[in-house]
Amino acid sequence: MSGLQLTPSRRTAPKPPAESFASRLGKLLNQDLAFGSRRLKDSHKEALYLELGLLLSAGVDIKAALDLQVQQQGASMQRVLAAVRDSIVGGRSLSAALQQSGHFTPYEYHSLQIGEETGQLVAIVEELARFYTRKIKQRRQVTQAMAYPIVVLSTAVAAVLFMLNFIVPMFSDVFKQFGGKLPPLTQAIVYLSALVRSYWSSGAVILLLILLALRLARRTPAYQRLASELVLRLPIIGPIVKRVYLARLCSSLALLSGAHVPLLQALTLARQMLGFWPINRALEEVEARIMRGATLYGSLQQFPIFDARMIALLKVGEEVNKLDHFFSILAQQYSEEVEYRTSLLSTALEPLIIIFLGLVVGTILVGMYLPIFQMSSAIG
């Protein structure tokens, strides 16, 4: 995006293809979880801004556009949009009505406010639709890339637990009848089987408690900081997650810069929208440095989360006063990298996981048959 495009975006939704089990699992993993939050799902916002942009660009007034939206939505979304519509009828602007509802981010209603003040409301609405489309696409790319590995790993764990609970004890009873010393590998597998059979219920309870604790703590700053730092340190996954959030950051800053929002305010709004601790912490310090007279690229340069390419392009953008253009270029580049890396991840993980599963199951089988082979050799 080199600037805000006033041309209406006319899209038709393609017919969804038949989904595989992995695709359905990816969609399940991709659902927006909003425990304790009043925020709407990203998919709801994408549909809202897409249809609202089409209606406004066709000349429909905002109240009539919201009336049409209310008729098409589910019960919860109907209540939100009806309240927004009633607030507009009462004299508020669209941005003020969204802010009053409490279901939208500062990034959204401040962007819309800029659009109202500059006469570019339709362009801002369409750009918000594109923003949420890109955001959802990136999340789906990551979750669908992980869907197959999760299915295979879950199957592997279930198979190993089944063997340790039922198959290994049968062999163990046979070994006891024959007596004799078992090979070290067989002893280790029999011991592991006994542990699993003795403590599986306690282990399941502990695992559930850990998952519950993580779910309750996921909104706390300490958890977000720890989780984000751990994710960034993961090989392969970390660079993908980093680029997902950098793409979102650059996309939001491209929109705000194109709408002539002051840089400090744009950084604040983007930070509030992003919700990723390493970048948020860096942006807070960047804002403080800019207030003291530093340049944007010079401030970003102090933090390793922002790569050299981003800093180099933004340096040029500041010098030629076209930050929105360079933010748009960076957002596109990061999005393309996310798509490529997630595709590569999915392709590379499939054979690796199959090999791992074969090694685990094969080790257990070899450990169980090794004493039988030894006894056969002794008898022979």
Image (spheres, grey):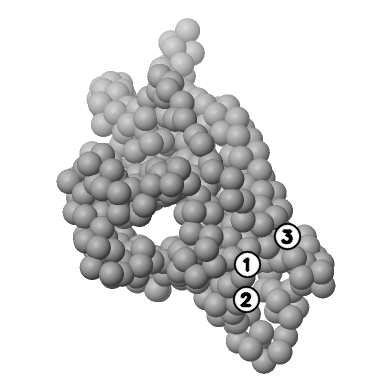
Query: Which is closer to the viewer, label 3 or label 1?
Result: 1
Residue of label 2: 263
- Tell me the SS state at disc 3: helix
CA–CA distance in space, label 3 to label 2: 14 Å
- Tell me the SS state at disc 2: helix
170 or 301: nearer the viewer: 301
Residue of label 1: 257
Residue 181 seen in the figure: no
CA–CA distance in space, label 3 to label 1: 10 Å
Residue 199 in the image: state x and y as whole percent. 23, 47
Which of the marked residues, 3 or 2, is nearer the chain's N terminus?
2
Dots 2, 1 in contact, CB < 8 A: yes
Residue 91 in the image: state x and y as whole percent. 28, 69
Residue 72 appears left or right of 258: left
Q: Residues within 10 Å of mark 2 (few under 14, many from 20)?
A: some
CA–CA distance in space, label 2 to label 1: 7 Å
Residue 78 seen in the figure: yes
Amino acid on which the number 1 mark rests in the picture? Ser
Amino acid on which the number 2 mark rests in the picture? Leu
Q: Residue 326 carries which label?
A: 3
